[in-house]
Image: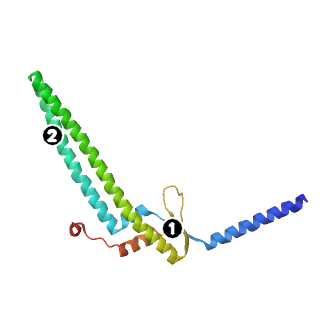
Amino acid sequence: MRKLIMSAFIGSMTTGAFVAASLAQETKIGFVNTLEVLYATEEGKRDLEQLNQFAAQKQQEIGTQSSELQKLRDQYLTQQATLNSSARAQSERTITEKERDLQRLQEDIELEYNQRRDELLARASEKIQVIINEYAKLNGFGAIFLRNEGQTYVDLLLDITEDVTRIYNERYPAVSISASQ
């Protein structure tokens, strides 16, 4: 009886493995790296360039305010001994206000940069998702996974990133930065 149960169990395991293997052979899977799509598309390059220009412009603003603050500090240090208590207190208040203003500016810029980046990623992600869904249906894919650093190995034949990038560029041609402003 035990041998019969063991034989039935092994038989069902073998059949189950065979069925799973044949289903896996029939199911077409793919992988796509959405960040690579974003960086490779013309629209993505344009949008990232605009984001980088924004960051560079704001970095200049921070640099200007930092220089002004440093000048006030230097001036205070050189004149500190000759200033009366009222003038010294006023200079210290001015420096403290400028430090606070600079800190707020940095925080505001970081917040705005993050919002712009998140909006860019959300717009691109929506478009990429639509393309992936259509591509999967048209090409008979059972599953398409997002490629990330957690996957140690993915056969290049399963990577559809280039196809998605090509379709994205065809569907959403980028308008140059100067023409879009």
Q: Which residue is mark 1?
A: 156
Q: Is residue 13 left or right of residue 30?
A: right
In percent of the image, x 27 and y 71: which residue is there? 175
Q: Earlier in the sequence, mark 1 or mark 2?
A: 2
Q: Which residue is mark 2?
A: 68
Return the x and y of residue 154 as percentages of the image width and height: 53, 63
In percent of the image, x 67 and y 68: which residue is there? 21
As displayed, is residue 73 above or below residue 131? Answer: above
As displayed, is residue 93 above or below residue 46? Answer: above
Q: Are marks 1 and 2 in contact (CB under 8 Å)?
A: no
Return the x and y of residue 40 as percentages of the image width and height: 37, 66
In percent of the image, x 26 and y 44: which residue is there? 106
Return the x and y of residue 6 as percentages of the image width and height: 84, 60
Query: Quick one: quadrant of the C terminus?
Result: bottom left
Q: Is residue 16 left or right of residue 137?
A: right
As displayed, is residue 152 above or below residue 94? Answer: below
Return the x and y of residue 115 as percentages of the image width and height: 32, 54
